[in-house]
Image (cartoon, rainbow, N blue to C red):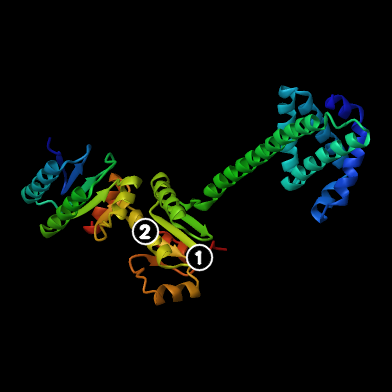
Amino acid sequence: MTLNYIQNNKDNIFKEWLDRLKEDSDETITNVILDQNFETYGRELVELAILKISGKQDEYERQSENFSDRMVNLGWPLRFVVNALDIFGDVVFDEMVKDKYIRQENELKVMHDLNHWLKAMNSEIINDYTDSWERTIANQKIALQELSAPLIPVFEGITVMPLIGMIDTERAKQIMENLLQGVVKHRSEVVLIDITGVPVVDTMVAHHIIQAADAVHLVGAKCMLVGIRSEIAQTIVSLGIDLNRIITKNTMKSGVEAALEMTKRKIVPLEG
Amino acid sequence: MRIPILKLHDCLLVSIQWELDDHTALQFQEDLLKKIHNTSANGVVIDLTSIDFIDSFIAKVLGDVIEMSHLMGAKVVITGIQPAVAITLTELGIGLNNVLTALDLEKGLEKLHQELGE
């Protein structure tokens, strides 16, 4: 009954719905609506609602997942989609009242049915959204982990680990693991840890660095700390951190030179 | 089971192949010192490549052995400590700071000869 009504008056409902959306939208939402594809997608949303109402569960699920994936990719805000669904419900109801489709005796039933469909659809869309967010976050986490402690062999026996950004306990653990595994894998004699990109070196970070250096010593290589900026040198000394056991250099350049010297090599200019 | 100690020119080679228990570790300490005395070796290489786990007692015994060997005039190089072992040791606060270390047996022997000035 309701289904028939919606299907017959699809265009009407859609127009009214679009008007109302435009009425009570703020800037971000207006941008979404102004998108030329919006009408296509809007229609799709309506079709989806009809599909849901008509009870074709399988097809609905397939299309809905597909649809919400695209929504997320397009950057449609969730609150907009939810709001749009709400308004869709209102519009259908108002139109029904206007067309005298709803009478006193069936009002409750139609309301109930409508609410039921909308609620189910709402929660499904929210689920799809959160799923896709969780996926994104998980992917980003993996990417972040891969980027957090890279190890680069530069010469035979010399490896560099550039660190950028804050170091917390979790990351320090990862740094340590990557560092040691890399040293063993590349058979390095000297490892340079570059902290040019580390904004703050406090006691905790220093502690982690000292631990890493100790562990590197245990596997049989030497650890050198390079890229110590003046303010970092100041904090290290004023915090009373003892870095005497680690060889320190101010730049990567002097670090590499020292590392080459340790492995009995040097860089000479070509003659002629 | 005793840990075999091999003589190579003026060096002693020890490869520890299985997890040490407390008794074996102490036995090893005694054996090694006796061997150093008998052969008057100048250097010792202890290879830990196949060891995946070291507890604080074994670490202490190793540290002691190294110091004792030192007293008897033999330099010790520890080689092949696994990354996981290195992490555990540093977390236990055992840095073995004054001990020579090397990546593998080959580099260990190289380092030993360097230290002995050959």
Task: Name the chain letter of the residue that bears numbered label 2.
Answer: A
Along the viewing direction, whichever of B108 and A215 lies nearer the viewer: A215
Position above or below: B44 against B24? below
Residue A267 seen in the current view: no
Crowd around label 2: few <14 · some 14–19 · many ≥20 (10 Å): many
Q: Which mark is first along the chain, 2 or 1?
A: 2
Against A260, is A133 above or below? above
Give the residue pinned by disc 2: A213
At 15% across and 58% down in the image, what residue appears? B67
What residue did someone put label 1 on?
Answer: A253
Instruction: Classify residue A213 by image quadrant.
Output: bottom left
- Quick one: A208 or A20, which is closer to the camera? A20
Residue A126 in view, yes or no? yes
Quarter holding residue B6: top left
**Residue A4, position in %: x, y?**
87, 24
Query: Is B111 displayed left or right of A33 in the figure?
Result: left
Q: Kindly report which numbered mark, 1 or 2, lies closer to the viewer in this rendering.
A: 2
